[in-house]
Amino acid sequence: MAKKLRIPSKGTKLPALTQLKQRSAEDRAEVMRWCDVMTSKQVRAHIQKRWKIVLRSDSQITHFRKWQEHQVVWDRFLEAVEHGENFLADKMPDVSRDTLREIAIKRAYAVSAMVDDAELALKVIEADLKDSADHRDWEKLELLKKKAAQADKARRVANSKKLTPEEKAEKLKAIFQR
């Protein structure tokens, strides 16, 4: 997944490199084009002139380039995932969330292997585990909703003055057998 950027506390200024990373995708692509035809010093001067972001060393440009290359891979990957999900949703509307999740995770693993990036692979594993945990939490929530609905129905049946004890027992049995 795309790397998260720090959010400064109120009144604090973001570091210059973070400010550059938060520029639009078009602005970042423009910086990458500058990097292809200019020296790092010239690129830093252009960035300062254009956006008033002061990068103090060439290593910041190097770091930005590496980061931006990862972003481009992720943007393409996420685009492909979205396209794949839309395709599957259109062609096979009965495909489960689990199947879509498996496909997305497998693609993410493939991308990390393709770019031979251990850090990216770790992030995919983290997302995979987090999504699995989220899915379990979702299943628990659904189960709790079902049990709450059953309890409400059972309470109404048990408090009903119109039903005989036999009818109440029969209805309660039906509620909890579903």
Image: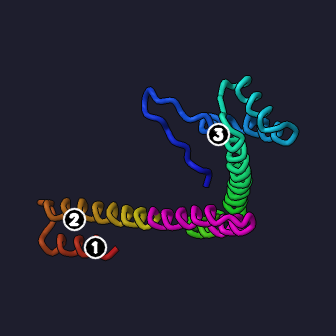
The answer to whether residue 125 is magenta is yes
Mark 3 or 2: in front is 3
User: Is 12 positioned to the left or the right of 160 in the image?
Assistant: right
Q: Earlier in the sequence, mark 3 or mark 2?
A: 3
Label 1, on which residue? 176
Residue at 49 percent of width and 38 percent of height: 7
Q: For mark 2, what is the residue?
A: 154
**Mark 1 crowd level (few <14, some 14–19, many ≥20, 10 Å Cα):** few
Q: Which residue in the protein does label 3 denote?
A: 21
Left or right of 84 in this view: 9 = left
Distance in Å between CA atoms under marks 3 and 1: 55 Å
Give the magenta range.
105-134
Q: Please tell me which residue lies in front, 23 or 83.
A: 23
What separation in Å lies between label 3 and label 2 (alpha carbons)?
56 Å
Please rate how many residues cluster around mark 3, counting C-alpha atoms within 10 Å: few if below 14, some from 14 to 19, many from 20: some
Q: Name which residue type carries label 3.
A: Lys
Q: Quadrant of residue 147?
A: bottom left
User: SS class of the residue under badge 2?
Assistant: helix
Dominant secondary structure (helix, strand or loop) of the stretch shown in magenta: helix
Q: Nearer the viewer, residue 155 or 47?
A: 47
Q: Where residue 102 appears, x then y in whole percent? A: 61, 70
Q: Are marks 2 and 1 in contact (CB under 8 Å)?
A: yes
Residue 8 belongs to magenta span: no
Mark 2, residues whose alpha carbon is within 10 Å: few (<14), some, or many (≥20)?
many
Residue 162 visible at all:
yes
For label 3, the SS is helix
Closer to us: 161 or 71: 71
Q: Amino acid at mark 2?
A: Ala
